Amino acid sequence: MDTKSIRKPLENSHIWNFSRVGGVNRVNLESGKDLIHLDSLDQKLWTALSCPVYGLEIDSKTLELIDTDKDERIRVPEVVAAVKWLTSLIKDPDELVKDHKSLELSSINDSTEEGKTLLESARQILKNLGRPDAGSLSVEETSDTVKIFADTKFNGDGIITENSADDENLKNLIAAIISCMGSATDRSGKEGISINHINDFYQNCEDYSNWYTRAETDKKNILPFGDDTTKAYAALLVVKGKIEDYFLRCKLSEYDPGSTEVLNPLKSGYEGITAKDLSSCIVEIASFPLSAIDPDKTLAFSKGINPAWEKPIEIFKSLVVHHFYPGKESLTKEELDTICSKFDEYTAWQSEKKGASVEKLGLTMIREINSGNSKEKLYSLISQDKALESNANNIFLVDKLVRYYRDLFKLLRNYVTFYDFYSPDEESIFQAGKLYFDQRCCELCMIVRDMGKHNTLARTSGLFLAYCECTLKKGNEKC
């Protein structure tokens, strides 16, 4: 590698140093001043003009922050903006051309308002992490938002948790809202609720109460069994199909008396289970007709009921039949139709139910919630949380600052210049390890996202290329 240092002034007063590498002049980034004046460096002298956010050997979270337009590619204006922001916040920009694992708080330029604010936020992070006297921050610390916000009641994300409330009733209400409407994860890692959860919850409470009021104002028709109407209807649904099957068999038997034996298929049914323990054959027995066919087309409750259906029929009789026909021990098809018709308005009302998400809380609790001022109290908690939004955002800016301090110069060494690529002791961020191939070690390895597109351009390179698909031995995961 032929290198030769060249000093060359460009259009502004800053003097750049260049090295000749492989017959090409490449700019050297050697000082903080070089970084400060990076925006004046002619883009023809930049080695690269864009790079992907993902697939490089550098923290992708840092690159995501630089990628301000979120197109998953980093371009020159974004790099320049990142460098300008970083150099404005560090007292001595020369520190930025060195490798650092953490940021000393004393390096933050607190002579500007933004620097002063970020320094305060950095100290707050250390305090939250239980290290108030520490003098430095690492990316591992600033990125651990769960720890940073673990013991805070409010953190500016617009989500409140049970920890946000001091009142026990409000804590219970937040838990109830989560159980009914779902939750959002707070920055502290806990499950909480947002303004949308609150609004949806109270709308559901109002809708459910209004829906139930309709039944209360027309109880005779909508709730013919009073508070037991739901149980009665459930009891009817359990046996309705089986009873209708019985009446249809009776009607077919009347239509064709010779079919009675076929419609009472008990003999053939017994043959399939007679050799078994009958107590284990309830499912098979339940498939038999409800009762033997009665020429009078009447279902008697007192005798001859299929044993597998005795209990459901007894519940139906006591809850439903005796409500309209006290003491009656039999049922006709007409009486069954009359009973079913009594539920018509109930089923229509049920089909129009609103606020079902909160139904499990019970009508009493729902109406207590509607009549109180708990909604305003929850709104107040949300407001207190949102009031800290700028403070929380500053904490995230500290994470950005620490990431840039650690990673940005490494990116510049591989973007503005290919310093790492041409250095025998370094590997560039676009290299992906080493490939041992035919007893040779190939170091120019990189991840190819689209082999077709890459191959189209690579044909003009004059290089011998090998495309490899690497798969982990365990799990068949491609890498």
Image: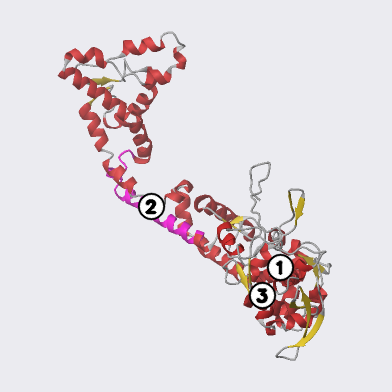
| Magenta-drawn stretch, dominant element (helix, strand or loop) | helix
Mark 2 Cα shell of 10 Å, populated few (<14), some (14-19), many (≥20): some
Looking at marks 2 and 3 on the same chain, the residue that comes earlier in the sequence is marked by 3
Q: Nearest the camera: 295 or 365?
A: 295
**Numbered range of the magenta stretch:** 197-225
Q: Is residue 322 visible?
A: no
Q: Tag 2's secondary structure?
A: loop
Residue annotated with mark 3: 79
Location of mark 2 (residue): 354
- Horizontal arrangement in the rendering, residue 123 relative to residue 317 (left or right): right
Task: Tell me whether circle 2 and circle 1 mark residues in contact (CB < 8 Å).
Answer: no
Quarter where residue 232 is shown: top left
Locate residue 311 relative to residue 403 in the image: left or right.
Answer: left
Residue count near mark 1 (Cα–Cα under 10 Å), binned few <14, some 14–19, many ≥20: many
- Above or below 176: residue 53: below
Q: Position of residue 434 (x, y in %)?
A: 75, 54
The mark found on residue 399 in the picture is 1
Q: Is residue 45 above or below residue 440?
A: below
Give 419 or 184, whichever is nearer the viewer. 419
The location of residue 471, given as percent across then percent down, is 65, 46
Q: Residue drawn at (33%, 11%), measured in percent from left and top?
A: 268
Q: Is residue 160 magenta?
A: no
Amino acid type at mark 3: Val
Is residue 185 in view from this perspective? Answer: yes
Mark pair 3, 1: CA separation? 18 Å
Task: Point out the frontmost of discs 2 and 3.
Answer: 3
The N terminus, quarter of image: bottom right
Q: Amino acid at mark 2?
A: Lys
Q: Residue furthest front?
A: 462
Tell me which corner region of the image, top left, top right, bottom left or bottom right, holds residue 282: top left
Secondary structure found at label 1: helix
